[in-house]
Image: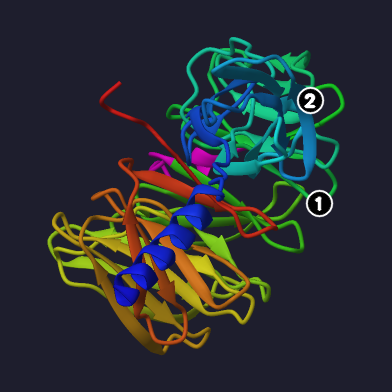
Amino acid sequence: MRGISRIFLITLILTLFIGGCVTKKNPQISILNPKNEDIVSGTVNIEVQVTVDEKNSISSVEFYVDDTKIGTKTQASYTYTCSWNTEGFETGNHTITVKAYDNKGNTSSASINVGKNAFLKWIIGTGYIYACPAIGDDGTIYVIGSKLYAINPDGSIKWGKSLENEYFNVQCSPVIGNDGTIYVVSSGDNAQLYAVNPGDGSTKWSTLISKLNNHIGNISLTLDSKGNIYIGNAAGYLYSLDSKGNIRWTYTCGQGITSYPVVDKDDNIYTFCKNTGSGGVFYSINSDGNYRWSYSFPINEWCTAPPSIDSEGNIYLPISSGTYGKIYKYDKEGTLQWTTQVSGNIYYSPIFDNSGYLYVCDESKNIYKISTNNGSIVESTNIGYHSSLVISKEGIIYAIGIDSSK
């Protein structure tokens, strides 16, 4: 009987102890809009649902972007909305945090990450545009459409230049010299190279390109550190002119230049030429027009994007084949360092970060992170777009492309 009494006593004590405990339930937060990893712009309505224990009530809900409080709601409700004007925040990644407090002092928080998109500032009509714009040191934007336009950063047109009896080559981007001079070319059999005054669009000088050779085709422009101009075309001719428009030299390098020539810090020129029936050749030419070295490719491999050059002078050439893509790395003397294959054709130049990696997007819509030391693929991700890439000083990579499903 004494044993039963002990059991009853222990049971009674446990019952009293458990009965005296009150379980605290913190508020539960669900962020409904935006979703995690969404890209946002303009004014965004942050929508949340907050639930609490039925015996408690919400006293306040606070909204934060990064470390900045953007709003507080104090009404008793189930759903809460706070407007966030993204214009006051930098483009890039941000963290939205919501904190909820109830009347018993319980609190909880929830967070998501979003990316702020560059917002649209203005739109103007310029006619068909097939080439990239150029931006001057003062922020003026130069673009070729029905005219050569100079556009102020606020979207107002500074000036527009037309040509008599000919048109600008809308597939060739304008380039800007060290002194601000704008260089553009016209199209047609009598194509000319124009040096344009950035202040008012007046012509400083012009040179008839077709007098060098009748093979004009698609033209690309590049400048070196001394202001010399390099013009490559689809017929395989690379021309060099000085900053006054005088012809320095002409170099013949195959059946057609398929990628923009690029210039390294020593003013050496690199370009890829496609030869009909025999594969392509990657050339290095010095600033005097003399051959340095070349590398030949099989007939099924070609290049349409400019190579990229790192700070040590190494060259990274993007190659397509119709089924796969490759990156070839050469040192500045032309020695092949490594080759890396990816799953799709590559139509855009690689970019670099500050940690020894390059990034490239292929036709299979994958972005690859590749070690510049040995060419190994560190990671890859499918973004759903075939895109060109740019990288910010903070190391944020932006993919710029077209969604063909829209």
Q: Which mark is residue 260?
A: none
Q: Which residue is mark 1?
A: 178
Coloration mode: rainbow
- Which residues make up the magenta segment? 207-218
Q: Is residue 214 magenta?
A: yes
Is 368 displayed left or right of 270 in the figure? left
| Residue 339 rendering spot, x and y as whole percentages | 30, 79
Is 51 displayed left or right of 160 in the figure? left
| Residue 391 rendering spot, x and y as whole percentages | 59, 54
Looking at the rendered structure, the secondary structure element under dot 1 is loop
Is 29 located above or below residue 276 in the figure?
Answer: above
Instruction: Give the residue drawn at x 24%, y 55%.
Output: 345
- Name the image quarter holding residue 361: bottom left
Looking at the rendered structure, the secondary structure element under dot 2 is loop
Q: Amino acid at mark 2?
A: Pro
Q: Which residue is mark 2?
A: 153
Q: In the orientation shown, which residue stands out farthest toward the front?
A: 1
| Residue 329 rendering spot, x and y as whole percentages | 41, 79
Instruction: Give the residue drawn at x 33%, y 30%.
Output: 403
Q: In the orientation shown, which residue stands out farthest toward the top?
A: 125
Q: Is residue 256 magenta?
A: no
| Residue 5 rendering spot, x and y as whole percentages | 36, 68
